[in-house]
């Protein structure tokens, strides 16, 4: 499962679809942020994390459903029975999310001055309230470059763009396999599907 070769990764997922592996990836994408928070000494709410796990599976299923419906609307019964394969291929996007989370866990703390990070850490651990947090952050002195390390921040920004490109490429190849179209029609369907996903996600509060 090499997401840095999206075409081959998606085709492999369609040839050997496994819902169990897809579910494992979604769970792993839920666990990694928890470990990242714990590594930074930030507080974790079990109740909130359980809700986030449920949300992860809802968004995962919703995204796969939108891809299936879009493909079915165009190709009809030719995509019947391929929902499992879509789930398997769609989970590759969650692998991208895992990589992005790991990069954020490493680079984000390096991007911010300890004088800014420590109050946030205390607030997360419920050692201080929001009012105290606001006062502490407002009281931090220094110019922008003394409070923010531009190098890891720039690396994180560039990495985010690259990872988004890989996620976009994965979805493109999912539609390419399902529809069998060339570049422009597949991109059009993908962009519309992204739009529908974000519209539905903004309307649903879970």
Image (spheres, rainbow, N blue to C red):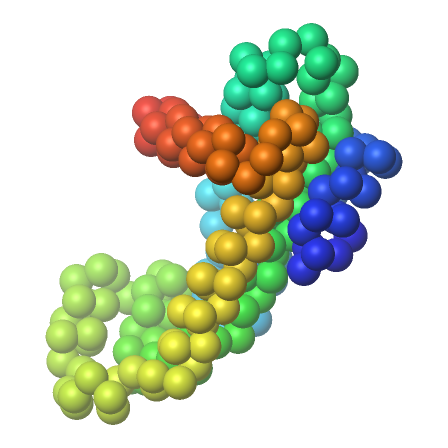
Across and down, in percent, residue 44 comes to: 49, 56
> Can residue 74 be seen in the rendering of this structure?
yes
- Which sits in the foreground, 152 or 147? 152
Question: Which residue shows up at 67% across the image and 51% down it?
Answer: 6
Which quadrant would the C terminus be assigned to in this image? Answer: top left
Across and down, in percent, residue 29 comes to: 62, 50
Lateral position of residue 122 relative to residue 68, left or right: left
Q: What is the quadrant of residue 151 in the picture?
A: bottom left
Answer above or below: position of 75 versus 153: above
Across and down, in percent, residue 202 comes to: 33, 31
Lateral position of residue 121 relative to residue 14, left or right: left
Across and down, in percent, residue 109 comes to: 43, 77
Answer above or below: position of 98 versus 73: below
- Which sits in the foreground, 50 or 5? 5
Question: Which residue shows up at 81% across the image and 42% down it?
Answer: 12
Question: Which residue shows up at 78% across the image and 34% down it?
Answer: 14
Q: What is the quadrant of residue 75 in the picture?
A: top right
- Which sits in the foreground, 190 or 37? 190
């Amino acid at each position: 499962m090499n997401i840095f070769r999206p075409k081959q990764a998606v085709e492999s997922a369609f040839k050997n679809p496994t819902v169990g592996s897809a579910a494992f990836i979604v769970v792993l994408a839920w666990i990694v942020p928890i470990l990242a928070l714990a590594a930074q000494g930030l507080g974790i709410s079990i109740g909130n994390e359980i809700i986030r796990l449920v949300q992860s599976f809802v968004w995962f299923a919703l995204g796969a459903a939108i891809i299936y419906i879009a493909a079915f609307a165009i190709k009809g019964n030719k995509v019947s029975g391929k929902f499992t394969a879509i789930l398997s291929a769609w989970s590759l996007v969650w692998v991208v999310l895992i990589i992005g989370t790991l990069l954020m866990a490493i680079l984000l703390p390096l991007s911010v001055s300890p004088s800014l990070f420590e109050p946030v850490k205390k607030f997360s651990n419920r050692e201080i309230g929001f009012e105290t947090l606001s006062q502490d952050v407002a009281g931090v002195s220094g110019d922008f470059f003394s409070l923010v390390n531009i190098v890891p921040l720039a690396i994180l920004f560039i990495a985010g763009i690259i990872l988004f490109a890989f996620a976009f490429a994965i979805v493109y190849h999912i539609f390419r396999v399902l529809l069998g179209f060339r570049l422009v029609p597949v991109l059009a369907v993908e962009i519309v599907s992204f739009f529908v996903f974000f519209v539905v996600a903004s309307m649903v509060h879970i």
